[in-house]
Image (cartoon, rainbow, N blue to C red):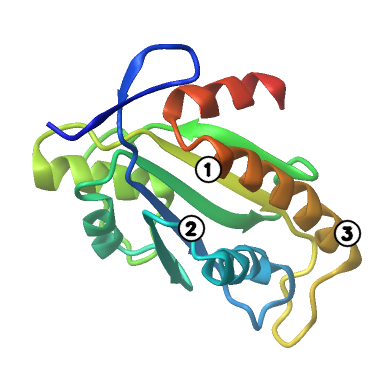
Amino acid sequence: MGPCSTAPNGEAERTVSLVILAVGNPSRGDDALGPLLMEELERQAPQGVHLVSDFQLQPEHALDLHGRTLALFIDAGTGTPAPFEFRELKPAAGHAVSSHAFTPSEVLQVYEALHGHPAPPAFLLCVRGEDFILGEPLSASAGQNLEAARRQLQACLATPAAGHWRELLSAT
């Protein structure tokens, strides 16, 4: 059992070991939203946070969840409500997936299949993008959405605990 700390609500809570997985292609316009947020995180170098950046999620990313108590997936989305969507994730239902490009829920499913126990609480910060054309810069609207997502990310990192993040869900 890991060390304990007292959460803001007074309940004992295990020390959080957070992994942040950001996906996207910096060369495809607004698909750069996830990597842009990750670049900021890398410069800030939050202590105790494991950072993973890739073009897309793969089955192997389930290994990045091992030993973690909390996970955050960051991505860009075309059908996402502006400026972003923040929600808790559940593992995908059904049989094993067989694609190379995974959703966060499929990564959670692979984790559970590999380890035989539930994945850590996981959340998605999906920032709305408009233009995903190869070679294009970030669109103006995506830049505005990025600012809002940055504030949400900072609120999450201020108290990296699933209970606090669930409270943030009701505030968005």
Left or right side of 120 for 143: right
How much space separates mark 3 and mark 1, taking CA atoms? 20 Å
Amino acid bearing label 1 = Leu
Mark 3 closeness class: few <14, some 14–19, many ≥20 residues within 10 Å: some
In percent of width and height, residue 27 lies at 65, 83
Left or right side of 138 for 165: left
Q: Which quadrant of the structure image shows residue 36? A: bottom right
Left or right side of 64 for 45: right
Q: Nearer the viewer, residue 114 or 38?
A: 38
Q: Mark 1 points at which residue?
A: 124
Amino acid bearing label 2 = Pro
Q: Which quadrant of the structure image shows residue 81? A: top right
Q: Name the residue under label 3.
A: 141
Q: Which label was assigned to residue 133?
A: none
How much space separates mark 2 and mark 3, taking CA atoms? 28 Å
Q: Which of 19 and 89 is in front in this view?
A: 19
Residue drawn where x is 78% and y is 83% of the image: 136
How much space separates mark 1 and mark 2, taking CA atoms? 19 Å
Q: Mark 2 points at which residue?
A: 46
Which of marks 2 and 1 precedes in the sequence?
Answer: 2
Q: Is residue 90 visible?
A: yes
Using the image, determine if residue 155 lies above or below residue 163: below
Residue drawn where x is 74% and y is 75% of the image: 29
